[in-house]
Amino acid sequence: MYYCISMTGKLIKGIKIYILLILTVILFNSFNSFSQLKNENFFIKWGSWALLQSIPSPSFFEDRNDNSSKLRFGIEWQVIPVSYSFNANKYVSSFNYFHIKPNKRFSGSAETFFEPAFIPGGFKNNNLKKFMYKTGVRIVFPVFHRGEYLSFSLGAGYYFQKSDLRVYDGITYEAGIYSFFGMMGLKFNYNQKALSRYNLNLYIKYY
Amino acid sequence: MKKIILILFSAILVITGLSCNILLVALRNVPTFFEAPAEVKNKITEPIKPNVRLSALWIGHATVLLQIDDKVIITDPFLSETAGEFARRVVEPGIDPKNIPPCDIILISHSHFDHLNFLSLEMLEEKSSKTALVFPEDLENYLPDYNMNLVRMKNDKGYESKIIGESKLINGVKITTVYAQHWGGRYGFDGFFWGDNAFTGYVIEYNGLTVYFAGDTGYDSLKFKQLGEMFKIDLALIPIGPCADCNQCGTYNHVFPVGAYELFKDIKAKWMLPIHYGTLHFAQADPIEPLYVINDIIKENSEEEKIKVLKIGEQFVFISK
C-alpha cells in the first residue's frame, strides 16, 4: 500500500515538473514576434507540442557488476533548453529555446541538453535506482541536405545516478547520428565511472 | 491517476495517427524508391538565348526556368533526386544542373519539401552570390542561410482578402506576392496544426511582360478574378496536380486540371503552362493522370494555342525578339 501511494506521489510530482517545463517553454517562445497574422491556435499548438515531447526515446542501459554485464530497457526524454544555430539566416535569431525547428538544429548547431531517463524494470546486477539524468552540451553537424537527411552530433556532459548506498556521477560522452529530418536517430553514451557505463538510445524527437 | 495516464496516452496516439499523411507518402514511394528516375533525352544545354523575350523551360514539378529578356528566373528549384527523403523523382530533372545559368531571381512559393529543396539551393548558390532568393514571410524559419541575397516578402494569406502581399523591385524585376490558398509548415504538425503558413503566389513584371507563378494553390473564383483585374498576365504557371480523382475541381489546397483551367480563365492570362505533376508520387495520386485530364480539357475547349503542355526538359519560346 505504501509503495502505491509513494509511486502516485512521484507521478504527480513528475507531472507538475512537466507542466512547469511546458509553461517555461511557452514563456521563452512568447518573445518571438511575427509581423503578420498567423492562423495559430495557442492551445492546439502548445498542447500538441507538449504531448509530442512526452513521447520517450526507447533506450538500453548497461547493467553491470564485477561478474556480469547485461542490457536493461529504459526510456529517455530529450530536452533542448538552448540551441545556437550556426546556419541561421539574417531574418531569424540564432538562439532558440526548447521549441526548435529541426532545420535550425540539424543544419549545424551547438546546444545544451537535459535527458532524464527511467528504467522501468530496474537494474538487477547492482542496486542502482531506476531514475537517472544526463545534461551537457553537444554540437550537431549536417551531412546531407543541410542535415535534414543525415547529420551527426558529438557531445559531453554530466550524468547523475543514485544507488542505495551512494551517488554515481561524472562525465558522459555521447555521439549521435540522425535522419528523417532529425526526428529519428541513434545515440550512444559512455558514462565514466558508472555501473551503467554504456547507453544506447533510439532517438525520437519532434521539434 | 490511471485515467490521466490513459487520456495522455490516447492523446499521443491520436496526434501521432494524424501525422500518418507523411507515412502514407513514404509508403506510396517505397516501390519507386528503388527505381532510377526515367531519363530525359536531348536535354537543353544552353537555355538562355539572345533572341528570346519570353521563354519557359519545364525542369519538372514546379521548377520552371524563365527567360524574360535578359533576366533569368527559376521557380521552386527541385533538382535533387528526392524530396523529403522518401519521395523519389520518377523523371530526372529536365536540365543538367550545371547548365542552369546564374539566376537573377529564385522564387520559393512555400516551405514544403517539393518546393523548398535545400540541396537544389546549394547547387544554385555556387553559381552567383548576386542571385536573389525570394520567399514569403514565415519561410525564414525553415530556411538555412545561403550565400545569396535573401529577400523576405509579405504575403496575403486570405485572412485580410488583400490579394496582394507586397511588391519589391529585385535585381531590376518587379516581384509581387499574390494570393494563394495552401498551407505552410514542413514537418507535419507545424503546417497542419500550428498555423505556420509560409506560402504565396508571385507575379513577375519586367519590360512590359508579366508572368504569374501560382506556386501551390486551391481555387477561389472571387480572388483569382480580382487578380485578373489587377494584372495583365502573359504567362501563367499553374499547378494541375496532385490529384486522386482528377475530374474534380480540386481540394482546398490544390487545384486539379479542371480547377486550374478555371483559374486560368479567371486571371485572363494569354498562355498557361501546367506544372506540378509528372515528377513525384504523392499519397494517392498517379503523377501522370493530371496530364490526361488537361489534354482532354484542351481538346474540348480548343485551347491548343493557349495552354502549352511541355514535356520535362522541353522549352517553349512564347515571344521572340
Image (cartoon, helix red, strand yellow):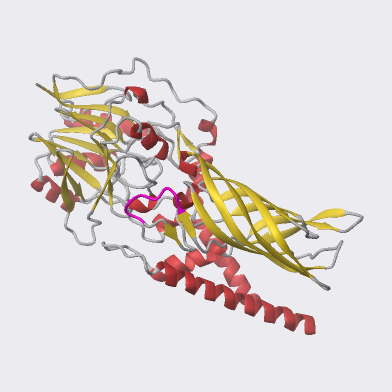
Q: Is any part of residue B73 visible from this angle?
A: yes
- Magenta stretch, main secondary structure, is loop
From the viewer's perspective, tell me whether residue B66 is left or right of residue A156: left
- Quarter the N terminus of chain B occupies: bottom right
Q: Residue at x 55, y 60 (%)?
A: A112
Image quarter hosting the C terminus of chain B:
top left
Is residue B309 in sight in this rendering?
no
Q: x%, y% of residue B87?
A: 47, 37
Q: Quadrant of residue B278?
A: top left
Q: Is residue A101 left or right of residue B58?
A: right
Q: Is residue A90 magenta?
A: yes
Using the image as rendered, state which of residue B131 and residue A158 is in the foreground. A158
A65 or A40, nearer to the observer: A65
Task: Name the residue rendered at 42%, 48% in the picture.
Answer: A87
In x, y percent, where is residue B136? Answer: 27, 50
Q: Nearer the viewer, residue A163 or B24?
A: A163
Q: Is B147 inside the magenta-drawn segment?
A: no
- In this rendering, the count of numbered labels is 0
Residue for point 12% across, 40% down: B268
Residue B233, image x and y in percent? 12, 38
Q: Write the start and end of the magenta stretch as one range.
A: A85-92
Residue B107 horizontal/vertical position (percent): 27, 40
B256 relative to B188, above or below: above
Report the residue that reaches farthest toward the right: A67
